[in-house]
Amino acid sequence: MTCRPLAALLLCAAALPAYAVDTVQAARATAEQWLRGQYDTPGSRVVAQAAALDPRLQLSPCPVALNANLQEGTRLMPRMNVTVRCPQPDGWTVRVPVQLQVFRQVLVIARPLQRGDGVRPDDVHSEERDITRLGYGYVSDMGEVEGRTLSRAIGAGTVLTPNALGGRTAVKAGDQVQLISRLNGIEVRASGIALGSGDSGSRLRVRNGSSGKVIDAMVMAPGEVLALP
């Protein structure tokens, strides 16, 4: 039987041998099951739905288990193309598009935070999110945050990402620091007490140990801050 495109596709599908339809369904099921196995780690919830394939596609029965894989270097995305093969000398290969959702618990900012702020347990809460849509990554464990500060401001409801975290805190509130003042090429150093915490480049307030005056400063290195004009 010769099939024509468009309106004739359904008629073609009805005209296919039963084994061809069964094999196509087996290919779709294999793609779904394989993806679930790849991403179904403890604490995850995976939803995989293979798209319908071309109804004109005819695949002969495969006497052995089907193989599935992704092209090397494929990133986790909401739509994945899984290659399914019948691993026989005269076997076939088909690419199956699959809509994928991988739900995991991630840390979400609970209130607005500023650059240089540390992230405390009460600054975040855990939510289930689809990580296939988190292209910038995510943070799921407070252990990844400990001792680090934010490299940029973040609004409430935002997923905490690795690139939002700066280095480990160089100065902590209460630390004794070297307060450096520069004017016309002259550098003066004094001891001071940090009134805030931050990593390199963060702004904070420091109390001059001699005068008691509180000034704005920028963290230069661990235990070292530069007075700002």
Image (spheres, grey):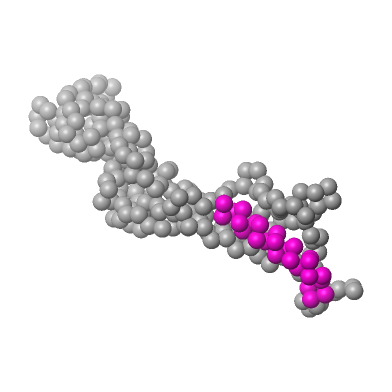
Which residue shows up at 37% across the image and 51% down it? Answer: 107
On-image quarter of the C terminus: top left
Is 139 above or below relative to 81?
Answer: above
Q: In the drawing, does residue 88 fall left or right of residue 135?
A: right
Number of on-image labels: 0
Inspect the magenta stretch and tell me whether residue 18 lies in it: yes
Answer whether residue 207 is visible to the viewer in this image.
yes
Q: Main secondary structure of the magenta part?
A: helix
Answer whether residue 229 is visible to the viewer in this image.
no
The location of residue 187, given as percent across then percent down, is 24, 21
Which quadrant holds residue 171?
top left
Which residue shows up at 25% across the image and 27% down it? Answer: 223
Which quadrant holds residue 163?
top left
On-image quarter of the N terminus: bottom right
Which of the pair 11/214 is nearer the observer? 11
Q: In the drawing, does residue 148 fall left or right of residue 46?
A: left
Which residue reaches farthest right?
1
Which quadrant holds residue 222?
top left
The location of residue 76, given as percent across then percent down, is 56, 50
Which of the pair 123/72 is nearer the observer? 72
Is 85 above or below relative to 23?
Answer: above
The location of residue 28, given as percent across then percent down, is 67, 61
Q: In the drawing, does residue 136 fall left or right of residue 174?
A: right
Which residue reaches farthest left?
211
Which residue shows up at 66% across the image and 54% down it? Answer: 82
Which of the pair 81/60 is nearer the observer? 60
* Residue range of the region highlighted in magenta in the rendering: 13-37
The location of residue 127, given as percent across then percent down, is 38, 57
Q: In the drawing, does residue 201 fall left or right of residue 69?
A: left
Is 117 above or below relative to 94?
Answer: above
